Every structure is written in C-alpha cells, then in structure tokens.
Amino acid sequence: MALLDSIPWFLVFTSLGKTIFLVFLVVLPMVSYTVYAERRVSALIQDRLGPNRTGFPLTLLGFKKDFSPFLGGLGQPIADAAKFILKEDLTPGHVNKPYFWLAPALAMMPALITLSALPFGSEFMGVKMVVADINVGLLFMFAISSVGVYGIVLAGWASNSKYPFLGGIRSTSQMISYELCMGLSAVPVLLVAGSTSLSKIIDYQVHEGWLLLPITDGKLNLRELLLFLPMVLAFITFTISMFAETNRLPFDLPESESELVAGYHTEYSSMKFALFFLGEYTAMIAGSALTVVLFLGGWHLPFIPDGSHGPIWGAINIASFFGKVAVLLFFFIWVRWTLPRFRYDQLMKLGWLYLFEIALVNIFLTAGILAFTH
Amino acid sequence: MAYTVQRPKLTFAEKIYLPSIIAGLAITWKHIRRMLKGETKVVMQYPEEKWDAHMPEHYRGAPTLVKDDHDRERCVACQLCEFICPPRAIRITPGELPTESKFSKVEKFPQAFEIDMIRCIYCGMCEEVCPEQAIFLRKDYAITGTSRAEMVHDKAKLYEMGGVFDGLVHKWNPEK
Amino acid sequence: MSTAPAAPVPMVNVQIDGVWLQFPKGTRLIDACGQAQKFIPRYCYHPKLSTPGNCRMCLVEMGMPKMGPDRQPVLGADGRPEIAWIPRAQISCAQDVSEGMAVRTDSPMVQECRKGVMEFLLINHPLDCPICDQAGECRLQEFSVEYGNSSSRFLERKVKKPKSVELGPRVTLDAERCVLCSRCIRFMKEVAKDDVLGFVDRGSFSTIACHPERTLDSNYSLNTVDICPVGALTSTDFRFKMRVWFLKETKTIDINDGLGSNITVGTRENKIYRITPRENNDVNGCWLPDSHRLNFKFIADPARLTTPQVKGQPVDWRSALSITAELLKAYPSQAIAMIASARMTNEELFLCSQIAKTLQLGDRVDILPRTGEPDGILIPADRNPNTTGARLFQVAAPQPGARLPSIADRVRSGSIKVLICLEDATKCGLTPEELAASKCTVIAIDILPNATTRLATVLLPGSGWVEKRGSMLNLNDRLQRLNRALTAPGEARDDWEILRDLLLALGGTQNPATIESLFQWMASIHPEFSGMSLSKIGDLGSPISSMAALPANAAQS
C-alpha cells in the first residue's frame, strides 16, 4: 500500500493526458494536414488546384451524400494514411534487416520525444501545459533531436544500395554541421533569458516582450533596442539551421529526388516509408515550436492573460501557440516551393564559413550588450 | 585548352542571398494571391468538365469497327491493320462467310477481332492502312477497365463503339 | 560401237540492253535475260512447262543482225554486228537465243507495252486484294506496282464470273481473278498427266473449267495453286486461314516418302498453316503431292504427348530416363529388342545404333518398313524418308523389316522382356492383345498416343519432323537437312536428346551438347559423312558420293 501511495497519481494522469492530447490530438493530425497544406500551397504557387476532391465517403456508411467540407480534399490525409497502411510492405532481399526495420522508428521517435519538453500553453485548469518541465529543456531538445540523424544514417546504410547510402552520408555531415550553428545561435537567447528552461524563457518574454518583437510588453528600453540586432541575427541563423536540420528545401540533399531518387528512403515502402514521412514533418513541427518558444514568445499574445485567469484563457494560449507554429509551417512550405536546392559544397560552405561564424560573433555581441546595459 | 568561365562579380547584397530569397518569396506570394483571388485561370476539372466539345477534328481516340448502311461488316479480315500495328495490339481470326449469308459474295469476314487497348498507342495506322474503310479512330479516350481481359476490346464492343459509317466504298454493291 | 562423248553446246552472242553476252544455244530468251539480271515479268511462262505465249507480259524489243547483200551480218565500228530492230515488241518466252540477237528489256516501247498489257489484264479483275489469299505473293499486284498504271480508264461494268467454284476436293477457283495464263491447264496435262482442265467460253467470258463429269482430284492438284500467278486457284485447306505475310518460312524436307521432297513450312506463332514445295531440280523439281503437303495436321493434334510418363504417371525427365536405364540394365541383352524408325534422322538413328551396340542387341533391332505403289511422278515405293540412313547405321536388317517376325515371335514367347519402341510395335506383326499378354516391358518414344504407347511402361514424348533439326538420306543417297519450324509442345524434347541421355544413362561416354557436335561424332565413325556438317549440307542437300554399297533392297526397286 505504501508503494501505491508513493505514486504521484495526479502527476501521472495529467502527464498521460497531456501526452495523448499533444501527440494524438495535435501533432499527428497537424502532420497529416501539413502534408495536405504542402500540396495545396504548392498548387497555389504553381497555379494549380491540388487535392480538392477527397471528402469523407459517408455513402459507404449509408448516408445520402458524401461530405466534402468547404475547401474540398480535407479527406485526403485520411485516404493517404489508409493507403500507407494498406500498401504492401516490401523488405528487399539485400538489406540488413534488423537495422532496416529499426531505422524508420529511429527517425520518428526522437522527433516525438522532443515534444515532451515543449511548453505548448500556459496553464489549463491548474495544470502546466508542458509534459516535462525540465530545467534543461533546450539542451534536452537539441540532444534528442540530434538522435534523429541515426534513423537516416541507418536507413541509408541498411538499405545496402547506392542512393540511400549517399543520402545517408550527406545527411550525417549536414546534420553535424548545422547542429553546431543551431546550438550556437540559441545561446544569445539563453544569455538574455538567463535560463535553459523553456518555461523560464517564455516567462521572460511574457514580462519583457518577445525577443524578436520587444514591444509586445508595451514598453521599449535601451537594452531591448540594443539587443534587437543580435536577436534578429540569432533568429535568422537559427531558422536557416532549422531548415537544414529538418532536411527541408533548400537543404534537402539527403533526399534530392533528381539525383538520389529519394535518398535514404528509396528502398522503403508502405508504413515504414510513412514513418520517415511522419518523422520529417514532426521534426518540422518541433522545430517551428522551438522557434516560437525562443523568439516569438511561446503561447503569449499581447493583452491576453495566462491560463491562471480561467480555462478559456488557457485554451486561447494553447491555440495561439499552435497558431504561431502554423504560421511558421506555412513559411517552411512557402520557402520550399520558392527556392531551388543548394549544391552540396555550397551547403557546407554556408554552414561552416558563414553561419557558424555569425552565430559565434553574435554570442559575444549579445554578451557585450548585456554587460554594457547591466 | 580549358575554357575558364568568368564568374560574375557579386555585390554584397547578392552574396548574402537574402534579398533574392525575399524577391523569390514575393514572386511565389504573388501567385498564391492571384490564385486565392481567382485571377488565375486553372486547369479543367476533368470528370465534370470535358474536352468533348472542343475535341479537334483530327483527334485520335480508341480504334473501332464500323458497319455500312446495309448493316454489313465492312471489315473483310485482310489483317493489314494487324500487320501494320506497331505495338501489335490487333488480333484477327479470319473466317469465310457462309454461302447462305446475304453478303456471301464478300466471302471473308473477321471471326474474331480483338484490340488490346493496353497495347494500343492510338497511332491511327490501322485506320490509314485499311483498304475497306472499316476501322476508325473515334473520339473515345477514357478507355478503362478493372482487368486486363476487360481492356481487350472484342468484335461486339468494337462495333458497338464504332456504329455505322456509310461512306465511299461501294465495291460490294452488285451494280458496280 | 562406243558412245561418242556429247558434243559441247555451242555458245551464241546476244546483246542484252547494249551488253554483249554469251549463252548456250537453246536458252530461252526470257531465261537469258534473267541470267543477265534483267528480270522480265511473266504470267504464263513457267520453266517446267510448255510455252503458249498467251499472257503477253514478257514483251521485249528485239533485233536481229542487219544482213548485207552477201547475207553476212553488217559489222559496226566495234566489230559487232549492226542490229536491225523489229518495230513491234516480241514475247521473250517463246524465243530461243540466236547468234547476234539483241534485246532491249526496258526501253520506252517495252514500258509502254507492259503498261498496256497490265491494263488489259486488270480490266475485269475484281481488285479484292483485301480478301484474296494470294495478296502478298501475287504477280498481278507486284507487276501492277512495278510496270502498270495507277488507275484504270475502264468505265464499263466488269464481267461477273463465278467465285468460289470447287474445282476439286482441294482446290477452289475464283474465276474473276483469273488472267487466263493456262499454267494450271498445262501442268495437269504435262506433269500430272491428268488433262482435266481447260478454257471454256469466249472473249471476256472465257474461264477455266474442269472437263465435264470430272473434278480436279489429282494428287498433284495443289501444285496448280502454287503456280497460279494470281489468286484464281486457292487451296481449300489454306483458304482464308492466314495472310501469307505473317507466315514464317522454314526450309526443310518432306518425310512422307523416300524422296525427301524439299518443302517450305509456313508457320505463325508455333502453328503450321501450309506447306509448299521448294524448287530442287535434283529431287522434286517444283512439285509436291497433295497427300504430302496436307499431312501436317497431326503436329497440332491436342492429343500430342507432352510429358514423360512411367506406368501412366507423369514424371520428370531425369527420373524417367534413369528408370529407363535401370529397366534396361536389369535384363540380359538377349531379353531386349529395339524397333527403330526410318522416320528418324541420321543423328537419331546413329544414337540408336550406339544404344544397340551398348546393349549388344545384335539382330534384335529393325525398322518398320512402309511401302506403297509408286505413282510414276514423284512418289516412290518406299514411304519411309530415311530407309537409307537406317540401313547405313545397321539399325535395319539388310531387307528392312526382315527381322520383325522373329522379334515378334520372341515377344510372344516371352524371351524378349523389354522392347524399345520408336515406332508403333503393334504394326510390326504383334497385335495389341498379344503385346499386352506378353507382359513385355515397353519403352516407347513417340509423339502421338497409339496402341503401343498405351501399353508402355515408360513413355517419352519426342518431337515431330518440323520440330527438329537433323539430316536424312533419301533413296538416291542424297543428304538433306531438316530445320526446326516449331517448338515442341509441353515438355516434349528432341528425340536425339532423349536418345543421348539414355545412352549416357546406360554408360555412354560421349556427351554431344548440340546436334552439330553429334553430327561430328557421327562423321568421325561413319566415313560417308566425313567433311560434312549440318550447315555444309545446304538448303538443297548434297549427294553422298562415297556411300558404301548397301545390299540390294527389294522394296526400293
């Protein structure tokens, strides 16, 4: 009985609730509809319509008409998911089977785990809207997300074929290179906020104004004015690194359809392929969320109180957080369908010769400004 | 001797890419805006809107067989189309018309006439080569089926699609 | 008085299209032009038939040496006679070459003449090429394209003649297409010696017909279809079956008699559609009996044996052959006999002789002789295609079939326990009941089921004659080649492969991988074939000069 009593039941159930809410009700649907958005936005950019038909086949269930909501095609992600599940799952004969099967899971899981340290809201019914509010949240996210590269490397190596192998190699060097930039470009934020806890960083921004938009608290002082330049620099380098880390265009060299067929997932099919897809888009969402936390004030909106003033406000905080994430996702997509792919040497040069130096200088700049205004 | 390409001299703004990236984003945004405002003319919505009305006169759709105005099979199974067909989609089994037939003077007819629409490339050579004007490429383009067997058009199907063509050939008219 | 050696044929000088050439006296002018690579179109002329000169297609411009007052040719500046050209075109088929003769085969006058002749020939032609079976090998089509006009000036109504007339059991006439060349009439009269065809009616209404109360039922009637230059005479068997341009033509030989007539097999997609004779003046000329050319339907028989069987159960080849070898090894050689077949190729018969040697069969091997009345034209008495080969390899008795009664007796008495049958044993002096009662183990290699294969313990499916390569020796010791036109159905194999594997299973050491290497092996043992190979035989065959004298064969004479 002492054992049962020692278990913090409230914590366990709220954590479970938060996890389920975050993963199954928000992130996974968001992934599906990001794919849908990707197709619709790319269609808009290319003067097409994109998937605009797939509704919900209610006639199968005995209804008179199929339900196709306002935009049309909103059933497409569900159809896609069904297709992925129903497709034949091929395992080619020449692959290294244990790693071949492990790789998709390794690509998907780290991206999901990083979400656990993410404060996606202020407070709701007295519960903090973060699964694990750890004081090294940022480091945790960096550490776990870098594990994701193993999925890609293993996929490339275990496939035992040329293109996936090249894709895996590229991915490794690209991720290692840009992880440095990403870490360094986040340091100024830590310096300013004075903590690696993501909740603390948001708290700082709630009280002192968003780092990228310091007037959200309604006042502007010299320190904020001076810090604006390093913060913009940090934001730009961080965002570029984020594109590279998530293998998004213009840095999608591990996949690069035109040269490597499909890069590391050439040999994958069915649900294993879908896991790579999910992992990629989850990483995109996690990256966007991190950007929102670090630079755009997290769940905070000016003139909206936090969740301690009532569950309505808590819900609005959560919505505003994911709203910001959605805007960033749109930006991701927009960039993808605008820019061409970098050449490999350009990618390396950009990472090591420019972004790395800028991020490094930026740290000293921020530290100097902080020391000056102290 | 190797030819050295002169790299263009880039300004600082060009070197940091960002202005041109923003210009690119502006272009794509323009497309999005125009699409959302409905200013861009987009593609046809296929099953509801079709080309049928605008189909050009020379359009080459599915090959079909035709009968003449006396309900006679124009095809005499000469197998020239089978011979000319580049993907070998046509398969004819010739037969002899029975003497009691109304058209027994024609002597020969196709016992079986099959066109494998999976193979057909709609080149129209069969129509061009036909000495009896019996095979025509109609305007049917949506040839679908759920099995390979279904995609093989047999004689009945070909006549159903082709219908009647009363044209120039009157060789079998006894008055001629 | 000894016979004087034949005087050499004198040569004559002939000018063809301005070039002086020499030809033996007596050469037909149309042939001389052909030898000079100047083809003259013709319908009625056939080198094997007499010359009526009635189609007028072979018109050429001809000239003779100009004669001086001294009746000597006037010589030109080049020392050659000057030519006096005849103002009207002459037919070249009815003219032999003579000294100083000159022809122009393609002058404007000749071209004009040919156009006119073509226009006349096509006046009443129905132009039903899409239906006509001759299309694709029709002289009318070819010459019309090459020498004729593209359009007709004839506006009147065409003469209607009977179509689809059954001249005989195997020949159908379409009188509208006929150009009245009379080749068929002359063939029936001169070659088939059965003068049943002739022209009736006059002018435009003239048409081919049989003599009253006669039909075209000669065993050579289908040759009229071959020589008909247009689609008037058609084979009832081949009529409307397949267009000729689809047919893959394989040169091989006929196996219905000891002559080994040269034939062309027309196939499409592994199915025979027709067999036509192939010209070989040393064997069959241009002709082939109907009975031979229509005897190919059995190849496509659905009852064909397709899988090796042991006691009626299908087995794979490997075990079938090992079971066969064990059966043969289990008995002393006195208890084994072999009935080989003179329908087999030399290579197969050679392997049979090797098997007989391995098993020490001695006189317990023979072939089934087939004989019939010679018809005096082509068909000889021996109806087996390779009796000579069987005798050469000593798988036949000196009088083929002479040992069959004794083999049959020993089967009945039970002293022969195993019978290797490459022919139907029930046609060799044994009734099916006797064979069944003898409890004799039968090993049969055949292509179609018969009384023997039904009783066989081991049944090995072989290939038909159009499904294999190999060589045969005809009655005149001429080595001729079979070529493969079809692939054998199912798991059936080439007979020589079956026999080779059987020989290997019985302890043979030679393992020829191809029929060519088998031929080399055969040639190394039988000096008759030394220096030869399958490819050296050629399409027309070649005589074996060093043939050892074989004992006289009563059936052959």
Image: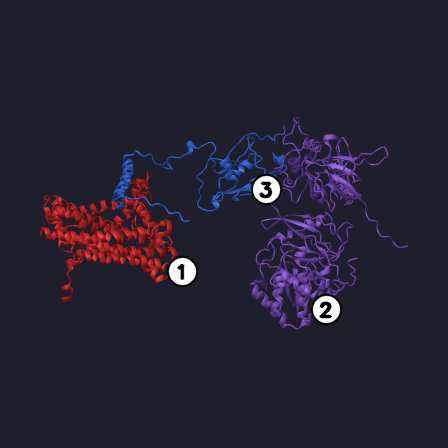
Chain colours: A red, B blue, C purple
What residue is drawn where x is 25% and y is 48%?
A: A30
* Callouts 1 and 3 in the same chain: no
- The reply to whether residue A104 is in sight is no
Q: Which residue is the extreme one toward the right?
A: C1
Query: Which label number is shown at residue B94?
Result: 3
Q: Quadrant of the rendered structure where residue B33 is?
A: top left
- The reply to whether residue C116 is in sight is yes
- Circle 3 sits in a helix, a strand or a loop, which is it? strand
Circle 2 residue:
C363
Residue B71, horizontal then vertical, whole percent:
55, 33
Query: Which label number is shown at residue B168?
Result: none
Circle 1 residue:
A94
Instruction: Tell me the crowding category of disc 2: few under 14, some 14 to 19, or many 20 or more residues within 10 angstroms, Cα based.
Output: some
On screen, C411 above or below C490?
below
- Circle 1 sits in a helix, a strand or a loop, which is it? loop
Q: Amino acid at mark 2?
A: Asp
Q: CA distance from mark 1 to mark 3?
A: 51 Å
Q: CA distance from mark 2 to mark 3?
A: 54 Å
